[in-house]
Image (cartoon, rainbow, N blue to C red):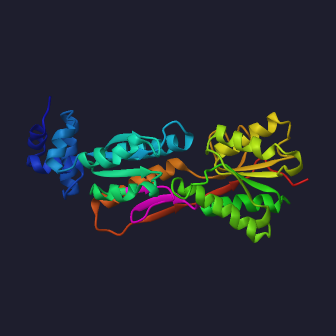
Amino acid sequence: MSTIADVAARAGVSKATASRALSGHGYVSEETRDRVRSAAEELSYVAHSSAMSLATGRSLSVGVIMPSLDRWFFAELLAGVQEGLFAEGYDLVLYGIREGSAERARLFERILPRRRFDGIIAVGIQPSAHELERLLRVESPVVSIGAYSEGTSAVSIDDFAAARIATEHLIDLGHRDIVFLGGQPDAATHAVGDRRRLDGYLAAMAAAGLDDRAQHAAGAPTMPGGYEAAVRALGDRRQRPSAFVGVCDEAAIGGVVAARRLGIAVAAELSVVGIDDHQHAEMFSLTTMRQQPRLQGSEAVRLLRARMDDPAAPPEQIVLPSELVVRSSTANAR
């Protein structure tokens, strides 16, 4: 098996130069870098991660923190992060731990401070648990994905604008009794993005003079959560809304299923719009605000590399656009 010394000898450089050329860290001229890489290919040399870590002073690993691994949005985010990290030659260490759990608290208090990461990507940070402050004390570059990002580089969408546009779409169709479906009452301390979406809905309703008709059917931002909240909202025939704005597509799809089970025609009797463009949105013909979680993941990796290369640089915020995709779950109000 070839060693870094063999590669260096073949390329006519020192072992330190060969290591820098292969790791991409530290200055090496392009001509030397190409010569070292050619030598490595000829010798079928593969650098051992521990040896690379010793040579570069880096662990060549990035910690990724997520609240869930079994939901579409987080799975797509993870795919984007993984593609970006692998392309840069970094290992991914994943922590998928539920919000508010004792395990999650232990992760921030004990596990992360002991680990040596070149950087951390955190999704869905909880301000109420002071998670971001704890991460910053770990002294690794941090990039967050989501609405809460105090003092860090971050990638997000404009959650307020997404919900406002979705609500305005329904108002333009003549709907007045519009319910915001899903999201928890304590979203300001946990799911900050959900709270901003609720605020966007309320702003659109107020701008249209409908603030006295605004309603929030609280529930988990999932298909079962949206289903349960929709059943409650649709239960009274006399006060039944004509439209839902889902806090996310999963809640909106839950609302569609609830309406169908209650014999309410979508969109002839009930219009439904979501936020995400979930993988099942087309199947349910759901009107939605499209976002691109894979792109958010890859952009987070790009921001993290920039932070790793220049820790003193000011934080950079990227707000990716979302667009209204109109399908057949919305129609003119009756």
| Residue 205 is covered by the magenta coloring | no
145 or 16, nearer to the observer: 145
208 or 273, nearer to the observer: 208
Residue extent of the magenta highlight: 143-159
From where the camera sits, is residue 116 visible?
no
The answer to whether residue 11 is left or right of residue 86 is left
Residue 49 x/y as whole percent: 21, 39
The answer to whether residue 285 is left or right of residue 51 is right
Residue 205 x/y as whole percent: 75, 65
Please tell me whether residue 34 is drawn above or below residue 29 in the rendered image. above
The residue shown at (18%, 52%) is 32
On the image, which quarter does residue 282 sit in?
top right
Please tell me whether residue 273 is drawn above or below residue 231 in the rendered image. below
For this orientation, the residue located farthest to the top is 1
Residue 241 x/y as whole percent: 82, 51
The residue shown at (45%, 58%) is 127
19 or 314, nearer to the observer: 314
The residue shown at (64%, 49%) is 248
167 or 37, nearer to the observer: 167
Please tell me whether residue 183 is drawn above or below residue 79 in the rendered image. below
The residue shown at (34%, 44%) is 106
Residue 277 x/y as whole percent: 64, 47
The answer to whether residue 87 is left or right of residue 80 is left
